Amino acid sequence: MTTKTSHPQQLLQQLKTAQEIVDIDLLSWPRSTLASKEIQQIEAKASIRSLQEQYGAYLLQSAAVMVLQGSEAAQNTFQAIAKAEGHTVNVDAGRLYRELAEPTEASLGDRREWGVSQFQQLLYGLMTVARDLGLTEITLPRPVDWPVTADAAATVAHVRNIIRHSPVGDTLQALYLRHLVMLEAIRLGWDEAVVPVLVAHAVPEEAQVLAQGLYRAGIVVDVPETVDRALVLKTFSGLRGLVAKIRGYSNGDGSNDSNDNNNEVEKA
């Protein structure tokens, strides 16, 4: 049985309390105590960011990631079974790039040719994401060509290619996915000693990077076309075995530094 830890439990309770204060509708609040309630809301909003940072630090020590590879249908089936079993925090590696591509896609004319306007849309989106993640600065990409993207999927692929080959590389993606994991883990109330994270829809070029860079432990899982519950549970067992090995090295003879990443590629 997975060991519970009191610290994340306390963080989750404090986050719940702070969010309840933030969600209070002040329009219906009595005027006699409105000012004090407004101050409480300001303080609660400030405390949520601090509490989220602490919870994120817990995830950095406790989360282990599986990056899925295979057909979209196979990955979706694997995710659905894992979700039904209650075993994972699921995130989508394509979400950042779809979010950034959406305004650019909407601005493309009939010829669907990129220009200065489309690139500026992308830069604005990057700066917005960076701000939302709490980054104080970001090195923006430079335009290298002005392609024609045939459809929305091609626009997303082009945005992904621009960012992955820019100075930010996969760093922004890793920070973004950690943020998604944190929000979803908080929503699900995860407070376990091991938090399995499932990342779907990563392109092959970034799969190993995400497995190595998101958390202390990670594996790339090649998902076959036929997926069932037994296969999913077996994969989880392999991930937990990797986590146990890391903790054994880190807490045993000291032969492995606790900041090192440990990664494998697994055939599901």
Image (cartoon, rainbow, N blue to C red):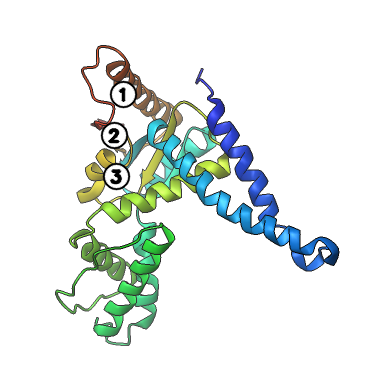
- Could you tell me the amino acid type at mark 3? Gly
Count how many numbered circles sit on residues in the image.
3
| Label 2 or label 3, whichever comes before in sequence order | 3
* Residue 240, image x, y percentages: 38, 24
Question: Element under label 3?
Answer: loop
- Distance from disc 2 to disc 1, alpha carbons, whole Å, reads 9 Å
- Residue that badge 3 annotates: 70
- Could you tell me the amino acid type at mark 1? Leu
Question: Element under label 2?
Answer: strand
Q: What residue do we see at 24% from left, 68% from top?
A: 140
- Distance from disc 2 to disc 3, alpha carbons, whole Å, reads 14 Å
Q: Is 73 displayed left or right of 12 in the figure? A: left
Q: What residue do we see at 56% from left, 54% from top?
A: 46
- Residue that badge 2 annotates: 219
Tell whether label 1 touches label 2 (CB within 8 Å).
Answer: yes
| Label 1 or label 3, whichever comes before in sequence order | 3
- Distance from disc 1 to disc 3, alpha carbons, whole Å, reads 22 Å
Counting other residues with Cα less than 10 Å from the Cα at mark 2, is it few (<14), some (14-19), or many (20 or more)? many
- Could you tell me the amino acid type at mark 2? Ile
Dot in front, 2 or 3: 2
* Residue 192, image x, y percentages: 50, 28
Q: Which mark is residue 242?
A: 1
